Amino acid sequence: MSEQEENINNTNTDIVDNIVLGNVSVAKDDISTILGQKIASEIEDHKRVFASSIFQDVEPETLETEE
């Protein structure tokens, strides 16, 4: 298990513990943090893919006319 997976699992355990102990606002904040990190990661991945493909040479498609 990678360090990141281990950290995520610990956070998930903390969330469950906080809910069981009645610390719902702390659990909500933890969930918001995890979702924010995942969204930021996906945005960065998309930026990398887009940036690497933006300047690639692409052959123009040939236009076919209907006869």
Image (cartoon, helix red, strand yellow):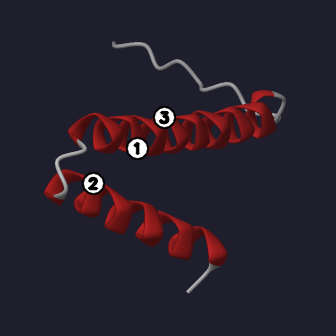
| Rendered residue at 79%/39% (across/down) | 52
Label 2 to label 3: alpha-carbon separation: 19 Å
| Residue 36: mark in rendering | 3
- Relative depth, front residue between 42 and 64: 42
Give the number of marks: 3
Judged from the image, the secondary structure of the residue bearing numbered disc 3 is helix
| Rendered residue at 19%/52% (across/down) | 19
Q: Which residue is mark 2?
A: 18
Q: Nearer the viewer, mark 2 or mark 1?
A: 2
Please provide percent x and percent y for residue 34: 45, 45
| Left or right: 51 in relation to 9 | right
Type of amino acid under label 1? Asp
| Left or right: 65 in relation to 2 | left
The crowd level at tag 1 (other Cα within 10 Å; few <14, some 14-19, many 20+) is: some
The crowd level at tag 3 (other Cα within 10 Å; few <14, some 14-19, many 20+) is: few
| Rendered residue at 52%/72% (across/down) | 5
Label 2 to label 1: alpha-carbon separation: 10 Å
| Left or right: 65 in relation to 58 | left
